[in-house]
């Protein structure tokens, strides 16, 4: 049997799920051993390659996470909060690395993931791309260098199918900016302006979400002061950057001690 780490992809029928499957299959460092979908989905019981409109891959789509995870070393999960939390318990039982790209997780969800992280290796990030994680570090450094004379605004754009806002990436950037300034994001976050709001509060970090068309992901961090503006920007033009990052995380996590990690750990940043 191959010694390559076995990877399971959750949400196999989704855009990211299919991108992840193609990335794993094309890799010479991992093998696809499972594809999961929700019970009742019309892909369940069929070969995932044929479902995707190609040749058979020898992997049948399943709705039995426990059975599939028993033969895997990692699961890559870009699904929904409830599914991610449920998978965390199963991945912990299987001692498999759980790579989480799911966004929209609540504080309660994160607490449950932390509990699973006592027994499993979890790599979670709002964005898996190298560029965004570099942008996060730059945001932190710039925020630390500039005082509150510079207002911070985070503007993110995504396709019209995205269901959560602000995006996980925008929140990553907000956390980085807040950390750079030595404050808690929850204390300075401003996520909505409508009507007569009054003047902008000094020190706040603003968020703006744009939804339209097929935008994959664009993020700007604006530092605006009297007389000048600084903008840090990342544009994703291909979802494969997220898939490549997620697979890198799954491979990096092999042999790591149980705990919670992020892409900065994976990338050595």
Image (tube, rainbow, N blue to C red):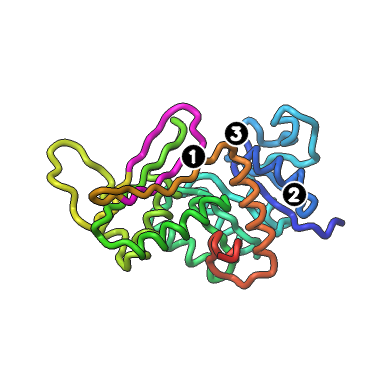
Q: Disc 1 to disc 3, how far (Cα)?
A: 28 Å
Q: Which is more N-terminal, label 2 or label 1?
A: 2
Residues drawn in magenta: 208-223
Residue 217 bears which disc, if any? 1
Q: Where is residue 59? Give x, y as percent.
A: 76, 42
In the picture, measured across the screen, residue 41 lies left or right of residue 204, that is right
Tell me, yes or no, whether the two marked residues, 1 and 2, touch with CB atoms within 8 Å. no
| Nearer the camera: disc 2 or disc 3 | 2
| Nearer the camera: disc 1 or disc 3 | 1
Chief SS of the magenta region: strand
Whether residue 30 is visible? yes
In the picture, measured across the screen, residue 101 lies left or right of residue 191, that is right
Reading the image, the residue beneath label 3 is 41
Mark 1 lies on a secondary structure that is strand
Residue at x-position 22% and y-position 41% = 193
Reading the image, the residue beneath label 2 is 33
Q: Disc 2 to disc 3, how far (Cα)?
A: 19 Å
Residue at x-position 41% and y-position 54% = 173
Q: Where is residue 72? Give x, y as percent.
A: 71, 56
| Mark 1 crowdedness (10 Å alpha carbons): few <14, some 14-19, many ≥20 | some
Residue at x-position 70% and y-position 59% = 73
Q: Which is more N-terminal, label 3 or label 1?
A: 3
Q: Disc 1 to disc 2, how far (Cα)?
A: 29 Å
Mark 2 lies on a secondary structure that is strand
Q: Quadrant of the N terminus?
A: bottom right
Residue at x-position 25% and y-position 60% = 148
């Amino acid at each position: 049997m191959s010694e390559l780490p076995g990877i399971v992809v959750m949400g196999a029928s989704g855009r990211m799920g299919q991108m992840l499957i193609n990335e794993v299959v094309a890799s010479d460092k991992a093998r696809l051993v499972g594809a999961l979908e929700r019970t009742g989905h019309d892909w369940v019981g069929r070969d995932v390659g044929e479902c995707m409109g190609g040749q058979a891959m020898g992997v049948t789509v399943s709705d039995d996470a426990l059975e599939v995870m028993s033969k895997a070393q990692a699961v890559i999960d870009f699904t929904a909060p409830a599914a991610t939390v449920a998978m965390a318990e199963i991945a912990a039982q299987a001692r498999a690395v759980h790579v989480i790209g799911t966004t929209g997780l609540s504080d309660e969800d994160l607490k449950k993931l932390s509990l699973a992280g006592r027994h499993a290796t979890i790599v979670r990030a709002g964005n898996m791309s190298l560029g965004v994680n570099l942008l996060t570090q730059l945001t932190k450094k710039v925020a630390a260098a500039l005082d509150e004379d510079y207002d911070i605004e985070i503007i993110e754009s995504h396709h019209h199918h995205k269901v959560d806002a602000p995006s996980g990436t925008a929140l990553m950037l907000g956390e980085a900016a807040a950390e750079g300034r030595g404050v808690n994001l929850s204390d300075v976050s401003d996520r909505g302006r409508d009507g007569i709001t009054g003047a902008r509060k000094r020190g706040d970090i603003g968020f703006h979400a744009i939804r339209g068309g097929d935008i994959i992901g664009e993020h700007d961090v604006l530092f605006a002061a009297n007389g000048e503006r600084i903008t840090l920007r990342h544009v994703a033009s291909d979802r494969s950057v997220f898939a490549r990052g997620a697979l890198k995380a799954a491979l990096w996590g092999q042999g790591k001690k149980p705990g919670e990690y992020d892409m900065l750990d994976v990338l050595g940043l």
